[in-house]
Amino acid sequence: MRRITFIILGLLPLLFFLFSCANHLNRTVSFNVKDYGAMGDGAADDTISFQKAINAVAKNGGGDVYIPSGTYILQPIYLKSNVNLVGESRDTVKIKLIDHASEWSRIVTVENAENVKIQNITFDGNYKMNKTGNEHMHDIFIYDSKNIVIDNNRLINAVGDGVSVSGSRKTSKYITISNNLIEDCHRANIVIEQVNHIKIYNNISKSKTGKPVLHFEPWEEMNFSDAKIYKNTFETNQEPDYYSIQLRGGWGEGNYFNEIEFYHNTVNSPDAEFLVMVTKGAKIHDNILNVANIYIWVQNEDLNFYRNKINSHDGFVIEGTWGMNSKRTTIADNTVTLNGGDAIRILLGSQDTIFKGNTFNNKAKTHKAAYMNARLTDISNTDFIDNTFTNFEYGIVTDNDQNKYVNGLNIKGNTFKNIKKHSIYAPMESSRSVSVGKNVYINAGAIFVKEKDF
């Protein structure tokens, strides 16, 4: 027993040393920008002081550049690997782009860096004093970087984007944008270009500048993957015929953004579209969407759109421009309230589309429950199963042009209620292989299929 006691006592210095090392490794080194000459008085140019603090932390091996309360006027600064930019509070710390900054000025650039956090700061792009600058003057710009966190900031008044994440074909990756308030930027609030593995959550993104609040726009001819967008609030006064949110893949045929999941978000843009294009395996579910329409445009594959509450002018528009159709789209269990438009429009072409278990109610009692016009290619294999259509002038209507057809139309288990004219109108001139069975008709018009009245 005495021998064991001596062994333990002999090990105590080693254990104390290891514990001290662990404590040292766990401590984050913090350098205060005011120790490097920053004034934070809203007048002095503090750029050199900030960059000196960043360089010192990087030389030290990493840590925090700490920013106490104040308003700091900056020209562009550049973060480095393992260097965090941390404010005392986004309500008391403001970093503002200098007046009349040079073109392409971004407040913060993170390029070819990793393990960086930007937190608790208000970034003001100073649009009023930089109106002549170009659209790439962002509050925060990330390029070919990984493990980057943008958390609990306020991003406002950028000439370009609030936060822009981009890259070469190398791409940025493992990016987190969380808990931020992003307002009134003049290209878009959030822009996603060449990125893999990105999370966007718990943000409030609002715009009174008539611009998008979330804009995916990769421009490389390649595939991308893994985007999760959840628990955000998006709001914009974007004008009609434009989009408030765009979820999109890369340029060129076959270049998708794979595995986008958009869920538990609230979108309020009553005049603008929610646009989805060039995605594969996307899931859009359990959102509240107050939008002009859901526009599913070109080259989506295996898109699942389900359990959303939607208030819109037109419900779903599926369009296959250039003959590049969406394939295997499933739209299920959504509740859609319309304000005078068509519940569904399928235009130019599509393939293997399913509408199942949705409820469509048109408050204006006009337009069509579904209008399908085949033009560039056939609209192939469309199922309407167990949906409810209420208060329309027409139910499901087919049309065509240039000898293309709605080919393979299955309509069963649906409820048509308060339909003034035909519940189903699918003449032989526009339709092939139409199957109608066991639907419920309440105060609804006749069925016309292949020149035969029912």
Image (tube, rainbow, N blue to C red):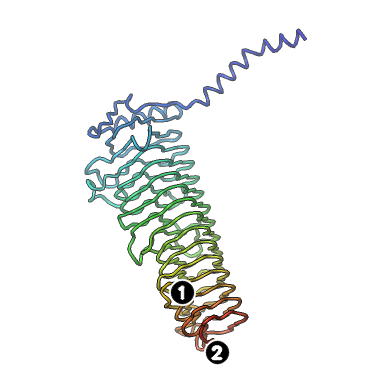
Q: Dot 1 surroundings within 10 Å: few (below 14), some, or many (20 or more)? A: many
Disc ID at residue 450: 2
Residue sitting farthest toward the right: 1
Residue type indicated by callout 1: Arg
Residue sitting farthest toward the front: 443
Q: Is residue 219 visible?
A: no
**378 or 263: nearer the viewer:** 263
On screen, 345 above or below 160?
Answer: below
Residue 407 percent coordinates (x, y): 55, 81
**59 or 185: nearer the viewer:** 185
**152 or 171: nearer the viewer:** 152
Q: How many marks?
A: 2
On screen, 383 above or below 49?
Answer: below
Q: Secondary structure at mark 2?
A: loop
Mark 1 vs 2, N-terminal side: 1
Residue 147 percent coordinates (x, y): 49, 41
Disc ID at residue 345: 1
Q: Is residue 174 visible?
A: yes
Q: CA distance from mark 1 to mark 2?
A: 21 Å
Residue type indicated by callout 2: Lys
> Which quarter of the picture shows residue 433?
bottom right
**313 or 152: nearer the viewer:** 313
Q: Residue at x 51, y 75 (%)?
A: 389
Q: Dot 2 surroundings within 10 Å: few (below 14), some, or many (20 or more)? A: some
